[in-house]
Image: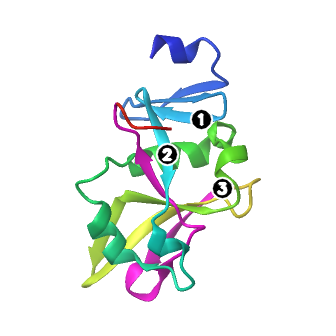
């Protein structure tokens, strides 16, 4: 992680101690790059059922914590806006079943000046290509 910090734009720490670095337009959490992942099904006209997507991604990827999302909202200068754009990014670490219905929180960048957290009921909502999942890059993964 030392090589990353030499030219970093910013570096902050979450309350639990996770290190977040913005370096050359890319976001890193504890030295692992945060990637935005979109499935082929999400690119189709009707999108993909959110609960199905959660099942498909669970166990295949590690997800940044919801605490990372909250820290980014509190420190918007750390969000790589050029590469992330105006989207709502799914943070699967926030996935919960409430009253028998699946919910997830998203980082909304639809207003780049004021990022916010949005909770969506996945039973009523399809994830489209502008709803990528935040995942942590594994060692050896291509960029």
Give how far across and how far down residue 97 sits, in percent.
27, 75
Residue under label 1: 26
- In terms of secondary structure, where does tag 1 sit? strand
- In terms of secondary structure, where does tag 3 sit? loop
What mark, if any, has residue 115 been given in the picture?
3
Q: Residues within 10 Å of mark 1 (few under 14, many from 20)?
A: some
Rendered residue at 56%/16% (across/down): 5
Residues rendered magenta in the picture: 116-139
- Closer to the camera, 130 or 120? 130
- Closer to the camera, 54 or 104? 54
Q: Earlier in the sequence, mark 1 or mark 3?
A: 1
The answer to whether residue 72 is magenta is no
From the viewer's perspective, is the residue at label 2 or at label 3 nearer?
Answer: 2
The answer to whether residue 118 is magenta is yes
Residue under label 2: 35
Q: Earlier in the sequence, mark 2 or mark 3?
A: 2
Q: Residues within 10 Å of mark 2 (few under 14, many from 20)?
A: some
Rendered residue at 63%/20% (across/down): 8
Rendered residue at 66%/34% (across/down): 25
Could you say which quadrant of the image residue 26 lies in? Answer: top right
Could you say which quadrant of the image residue 112 lies in? Answer: bottom right
Give how far across and how far down residue 133 sits, in percent.
46, 58
Q: Is residue 62 above or below residue 91?
A: above
- Closer to the camera, 61 or 119? 61
- Measure the alpha-carbon separation of dots 1 and 3: 17 Å
């Amino acid at each position: 992680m030392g090589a990353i910090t030499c030219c970093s734009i910013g570096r902050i720490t979450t309350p639990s101690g996770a290190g977040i670095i913005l370096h050359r337009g890319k976001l890193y959490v504890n030295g692992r790059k945060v990637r935005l992942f979109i499935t082929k099904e999400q690119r189709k006209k009707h999108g993909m059922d959110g609960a199905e997507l959660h099942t498909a991604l669970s166990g295949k990827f590690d997800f940044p914590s919801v605490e990372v999302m909250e820290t980014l909202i509190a420190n918007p200068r750390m969000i790589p806006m050029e590469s992330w754009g105006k989207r709502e990014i799914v943070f699967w670490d926030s996935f919960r079943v409430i009253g028998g219905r699946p919910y997830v929180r998203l980082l909304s960048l639809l207003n780049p000046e004021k990022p916010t957290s949005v909770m969506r009921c996945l039973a009523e909502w399809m994830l489209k290509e502008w709803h990528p999942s935040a995942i942590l890059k594994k060692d050896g993964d291509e960029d």
